[in-house]
Image: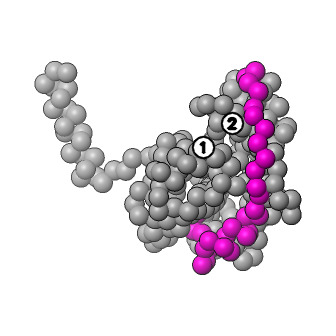
């Protein structure tokens, strides 16, 4: 590295410190958007519920908040990933379960191997799509389930400020089971594109339509995820 480039990097580093810039850990900067939103709402230490945590730090929507001293609950069906989450985030509550849509106590989890474990899903249909496109055969694992409302009641004194939801194909179904009258989070970030490894994914408009019907507005969209906020927090009718 020559001297000019070195001095340039030092200058940029000083600028970052002065501007109090933050590092994003999320896939497409969702944590920075949500942090800005919470600052606008004067919520400095938001609580969070992350469903489908997978990696505890990289490509994670809540690690930024954990890193600034916030606490929450991480839900992850993959037992090996749960071990890693507990190691990297000891102050969080980590639940090795899936989210139940009814009273069924457990369900088959289609676990994809290695670095592709983020493809894992409880949806047989989604598992078949991934298998067809990749040629990989997922392992079938029986995992305990618990409804989202029960998790919130058990682990939060008040509804979490932030819900991050990424469960590979069942996001809308889970949202439909949430008690919006009593347990609705202030901000909800949901994956709103269909799966594709050939860049042919499509937006899931049904999720936005549902959230808008429940008193939320679209605050931001990163193509991969949509961030919804309660209308009443911004006095939006």
Residue shown at the point (20%, 32%) measured from the top left: 8
Q: Do the residues labelled 1 and 2 touch (CB within 8 Å)?
A: no
- Secondary structure beneath label 1: helix
Say how the picture is coloured.
one colour
Residue shown at the point (28%, 46%) measured from the top left: 16
Of 121 and 95, which appears nearest the observer? Answer: 95
Of 218 and 117, which appears nearest the observer? Answer: 117
Number of numbered discs visible in the structure rendering: 2
- Measuring from the top left, give residue 46's x and y in whole percent: 50, 67
**Dot 2 alpha-carbon crowd within 10 angstroms: few under 14, some 14 to 19, many 20 or more:** many
Please determine whether, in this image, residue 160 is positioned above or below residue 64.
below
Of 40 and 123, which appears nearest the observer? Answer: 123
Of 17 and 154, which appears nearest the observer? Answer: 154
Residue 1 visible? The answer is yes
> Where residue 183 is drawn, which disc sits there?
none
Most distant residue in the left direction = 3
Looking at the image, residue 161 sits to the left or right of residue 237; the answer is left
Disc with the residue nearer the chain's start (1 vs 2): 1
Please determine whether, in this image, residue 108 is positioned above or below residue 131.
below
Say which residue label 1 marks: 80
Say which residue label 2 marks: 119
Q: Distance between the residues labelled 1 and 2?
A: 15 Å
**Is residue 136 a member of the stretch shown in magenta?**
yes
- Measuring from the top left, give residue 229's x and y in whole percent: 62, 63
Residue shown at the point (76%, 71%) measured from the top left: 179
- Measuring from the top left, give residue 117's x and y in whole percent: 64, 36
Span shown in magenta: 133-162
Residue shown at the point (47%, 62%) measured from the top left: 91
- Measuring from the top left, give residue 227's x and y in whole percent: 61, 55
Q: In which quarter of the image is the N terminus?
A: top left
């Amino acid at each position: 590295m020559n001297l000019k480039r070195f001095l340039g990097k030092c200058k940029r580093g000083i600028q970052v410190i002065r501007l109090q810039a933050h590092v994003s850990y999320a896939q497409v900067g969702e944590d920075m958007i949500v942090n800005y939103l919470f600052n606008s709402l004067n919520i400095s230490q938001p609580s969070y519920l992350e469903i489908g945590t997978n990696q505890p730090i990289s490509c994670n929507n809540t690690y930024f908040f954990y890193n600034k001293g916030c606490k929450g609950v991480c839900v992850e069906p993959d037992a090996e990933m749960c071990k890693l989450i507990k190691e990297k985030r000891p102050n969080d509550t980590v639940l090795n379960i899936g989210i139940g849509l009814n009273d069924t106590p457990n369900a088959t989890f289609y676990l994809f191997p290695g670095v592709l474990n983020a493809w894992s899903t409880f949806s047989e249909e989604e598992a078949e799509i991934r298998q067809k496109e990749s040629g990989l055969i997922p392992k079938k694992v029986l995992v305990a389930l618990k409804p989202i409302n029960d998790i919130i009641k058990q682990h939060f004194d008040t509804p979490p400020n932030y819900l991050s939801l990424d469960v590979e194909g069942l996001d809308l179904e889970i949202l439909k089971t949430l008690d919006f009258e009593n347990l609705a989070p202030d901000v909800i970030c949901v994956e709103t594109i269909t799966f594709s490894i050939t860049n042919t994914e499509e937006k899931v408009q049904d999720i936005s339509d549902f959230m808008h019907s429940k008193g939320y507005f679209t605050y931001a969209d990163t193509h991969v995820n949509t961030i919804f906020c309660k209308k009443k927090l911004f006095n939006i009718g």
